[in-house]
Image: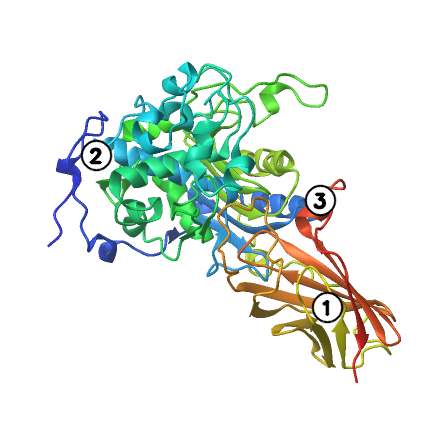
Amino acid sequence: MITSRRAFLRTASLAPFSLWIPQVFAEETSLQLARSTPEAQGVAAKGILDFIDAVEREKFELHSFMMLRHGKVIAEGWWKPYGPEFVHTMYSMSKSFTSTAVGFAVTEGKLNVEDKVVSFFADDLPATISENLAAMRVKDLLTMSTGHEKEPTQVCVKSEDWARTFLAQNIAHKPGTQFMYNSVATYMCSAIVQRLTHQTVLDYLTPRLLAPLGIKGMKWETCPHGINTGGWGLSIQTEGLAKFGQFLLQKGMWNGEQLLPAAWVEEATRFHIQQPGGDKKDRPKAQNDWLQGYGYQFWRCQGSGFRGDGAFGQFTIVLPEQEAVIVMTSENKNMQGQLDLVWKHLLPAIGSKEPQVADLSRLKTLALVPQQGSKTSPAAVSKKFKLESNGLGLKEASFGFDDNGCTFTADNHTITCGVGTWLRGVATFPGTPPRLISGGMPKQPAPSKIAASTAWKDERTLVMQWRYYETPHSDVVTCVFDGDNVTISFLNSITAMNPKAKDVRVPLKGRASV
């Protein structure tokens, strides 16, 4: 019999307590959130449909969307080839989970946010410890106010020892006084939790948060020393994000059990520090969701809400006044524009006095458009090509065509592309998948799940679209055939959004082999 844990928790205090973690607790937890309808929960379904219309009309690329009210899912959808069963890379949305791990460690008396960072890294300190470095607290890591002269993440992840490199950087400002976004500061939180618990953040969170909420299948990248990257690198299913948001909305309560003190959730999600910036001609400060204040790895939103978010539009938005949670995964450059659609369409729909019934079946048929163009060409002849020396280390490439599409093979890497549809596969193609930050990459490339489609742009040009559907990203691969020659060029979706960037993969050139 499982005994209640409420007697073990002091929700009004962050005082240490002996945390009881039942190994079988997950068995009594429903794996899925309850489902309902918008109108049953006082939400105008038309607002949801208007949101979806605006997303597609304004060409925002969403991969998934889920909306909850009163703890129940009232709308959900995935744009194929994405789906509910697949995890999705979270980028900086990962930070909010690391913050929560710190919260559990504080609650268990292993840690205090006022503890000095240097106290955990005696073997990694520079020869001379500056006054500002000595003063840096765990709280300064959590609030992105470490005092660094420059954001140190890229320098740190290029080293073998990220913590040592972090501590060696110049701390130009008094910690706690100036906000500067700092992903490796979150990594330091992860490293501290691991040093104290002898577990990665992911392993530490599993019995405390993930198992009780019924969240399974999460993955988290690690540094060269086996520490979860903390500030990025988490992959999770959309419903897992929604459960996390609901857990925060309920201030640490789940299924009648106080897993984390409400006082910690309130402390972590409240305003702690102001980001630099002010009114601009095109957007007043009050309408800028990146200038509403920052908590412990949580952003404040316009109004009374807060959120965790990650690059390219990974969002968990918590709206306490409306008793709602909104989750999105996506690949968008304009994250503020994405939030604007939430405030314009979804927020007014909540609490509608006369919510009208509307057909949401459209959310079951959402899809990203496969590669567009002709289905075939006179050049659609199966051939094998010997490749010139190239940075990807590939020796040969071949193309096989049939009525269903194209099978592209480079050495032992094969990707099958559908015509007018997405075909799923797995490959370890060099240089894939695209990623914003290199830290946490495995030494040996891991296989990527790929959904691929293809079409002919003209009689000589075959275009393949490869979607790495457990990440936000994709590749467009353009193959130009000229008699017995082929040129294969790559453009990843990160580069495509940044005109100043250039895909580091040079085109492959090949000649038909006998």
Name the foreground residue: 513 vs 325. Answer: 513
Asked if the residue at tag 2 contacts the one at tag 3, i.e. Cβ–Cβ closer than 8 Å, the answer is no
Q: Earlier in the sequence, mark 3 or mark 1?
A: 1
Q: In x, y percent, where is residue 483?
A: 89, 75
On residue 422, which mark appears? none
How far across and how far down the image is residue 203, in percent?
31, 49
- Between 255 and 380, the one lying in front of the other is 380
Task: Give the residue pinned by disc 1.
Answer: 454
Q: Earlier in the sequence, mark 3 or mark 2?
A: 2
Label 1 secondary element: strand
Decide if residue 92 is on the left or right side of residue 456: left
Ranked by sequence position, the earlier of labels 1 and 2 is 2
Picture layout, residue 99 above or below residue 236: above
- Viewed as shown, does residue 182 lie left or right of 270? right
Q: Name the residue beneath numbered marker 2.
A: 108
Residue under the point 76% across and 76% down: 385
Secondary structure category for the residue under label 2: loop
Question: Looking at the figure, which quarter contains the C terminus?
Answer: bottom right
Identify the residue shown where x is 69% and y is 62%: 465
Left or right of 398, for residue 451: left
Q: CA distance from mark 3 to mark 1?
A: 21 Å
Disc 3 from disc 2: Cα separation: 44 Å
- Would you name the residue on which mark 3 appears? 497
Distance Cα–Cα, label 1 vs label 2 = 54 Å
Circle 2 packing at 10 Å, graded few (<14), some (14-19), many (20+), is: some
- What amino acid type should be assigned to the residue bearing mark 3? Met
Other residues around mark 1 within 10 Å, as few (<14) / some (14–19) / many (≥20):
many
